[in-house]
Image (cartoon, helix red, strand yellow):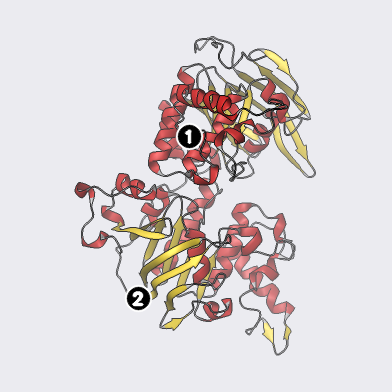
Amino acid sequence: MIAAPDAPLPTPDAAAVPAVELRGIVKRFPGVVANDGVDFDLRVGEIHALLGENGAGKSTLMNVLDGLYRPDAGEIRVLGRAVEFRSPRDAIAAGLGMVHQHFALVPTQTVTENVLLGLARPRLRLDLRHFDEEVADLARRHGLAVDPRARVWQLSVGEQQRVEILKMLYRGARILILDEPTAVLAPQEAADLFRTLRAMVAGGSSVVFISHKLGEVGQIADRVTVMRRGRVTAAGVATRTTTPAGLARLMVGREVVEAIERSPFAPGPVVLRLRDVAAESDRGLPALRGVSLEVRAGEILGVAGVAGNGQSELAQVMTGLRRCTAGSIVVDGGEVGNRAPREAIGRRVAHVPEDRTGVGTAPDLSVADNLIMKSYREPPVARRWSIDRGAVRRFANRLREAYAIAAPSVETEARLLSGGNLQRLILAREIASEPRLMVAVQPTRGLDVGAIATVHRLLLDQRAAGAATLLISEDLDEILALADRVAVIYEGRIVGLFDAAAADVATIGLLMTGGSATPAAAPGDAGRSVP
């Protein structure tokens, strides 16, 4: 059993008993072997990164370790002792805790109340003041700055992540599994997280770090294990001995072009013009507050911001999925604000939504039916008042081959596709409409390095074809790699506009979290803040 939270663990030592050992783990699901004899070890006092493509088996492996799944074969050891976990509660009792990418917090409750949720104590009387002090002391000891009395809805995304980590630490976890922990963080918040993790492992804790960002893996991890198709292709490689390109090759089994080549930006006419656009969130609160932007033909404008600052609402008002309460949205000279989605489609607005299954596709329909969703009214798919199924199959097969959508046939249901292939399907459908404006929201979230490279290439191809692209992403590295200009959004307002080639990451990160650009870092004409 793992030591109590305040008891010292062994000093990190290469010869010490590993914090965790997985030996010969096998986990099968109908028709697939997700883990095929996997070995993995985590040392006391280290950060060990786990990498792999979508479907490589890394999430399954960590769900086995966290007690969500029971392995079909193999052994789990914690500090040298064989254990069997029937639930995450058993894993927590053994000192293991997993922080998932999507937080499980109650927004209306305080930090302390969220930390206490699910615990057996207190049973009868809740003395919040006493527990506030306990949580505050735990936060101070681990460098997790957060106010125990604050309500979760008042916290930034980075602070909410600290609450999730505090929940695990309060329960005695000394071994943490972090799933894509920087996916929704600004650069400064990611740096704060890294400092916290380093302080924790220095005190004897251990961390499994799951990420698709190869650069940050090299920055934070001591060792890396790579999985591909359910098996380990590289076990416990010291990060100082490898490169991001080498890790990418181990993940996908081939060379992956790391550098993104962009032709010089030759601005065309204005395609999209937003003027003083305002809109409300689903809760009836202000989500957009006087947003003004322009995007030109052949340009990618990246919108950078921490999750929940109006990005989703911005995409929805341009595509007819949300009403504006004020302002104007003009595409190619025609108003699309507060019009039906068909108006935006008629103006050749393509939409790659954040939610691939709920908005981007109809999961229970076939690949073919999903591919014709924007063209079923037009020839050759439409034939008078009916649909020509032969034309549908020919059209769908052409797109399936052109975009390398891995599906047994175009009659396969979309819900059976992997995340990467589902995104290829959406991009194929939207690009086939020959868009004048592409609105892409989190286009690579959750994708592996190979699929990300494909999506980036397709977006740049549209730029070269003269389309205007609004790229909304929480991945600042992605925005700086693809965009010609960068707009920063905070609490529904555009607080800065920059030329991407001259953009300062620290300044953008500061604006993303509500700070102000310093005079020394203030951009020139291309980066004047929009009132």
Is residue 413 found left or right of 236 in the rendered image? right
Neighbour tally class for label 2: few under 14, some 14-19, many 20 plus, Cα within 10 Å: some
Neighbour tally class for label 1: few under 14, some 14-19, many 20 plus, Cα within 10 Å: some
Image: 178 above or below 344: above
Does residue 190 appear anywhere in the picture? yes
Disc 2 to disc 1, C-alpha distance: 46 Å
Amino acid residing under circle 1: Asp
What quarter of the picture does the N terminus occupy? Answer: top right
Place of residue 125 in the rendered image (x, y in percent of width and height, measured from the top left): 68, 27
Is residue 382 found left or right of 521 in the rendered image? right
**Which residue is under mark 1?**
147
Place of residue 145 in the rendered image (x, y in percent of width and height, measured from the top left): 44, 32
Residue at image location 44% in from the left, 22% down from the top: 199
**Which residue is under mark 2?**
270
Sequence-wise, the earlier of marks 2 and 1 is: 1
Place of residue 316 in the rendered image (x, y in percent of width and height, measured from the top left): 53, 67
Place of residue 497 in the rendered image (x, y in percent of width and height, measured from the top left): 31, 59
Image: 167 above or below 337: above
Q: Are marks 2 and 1 in contact (CB under 8 Å)?
A: no
Residue at image location 76% in from the left, 30% down from the top: 70
Q: How many marks?
A: 2
Residue at image location 52% in from the left, 53% down from the top: 444
Quadrant housing residue 177: top right
Is residue 367 found left or right of 134 in the rendered image? right
Q: Secondary structure at mark 1?
A: loop
Q: Nearer the viewer, residue 85 or 367?
A: 85
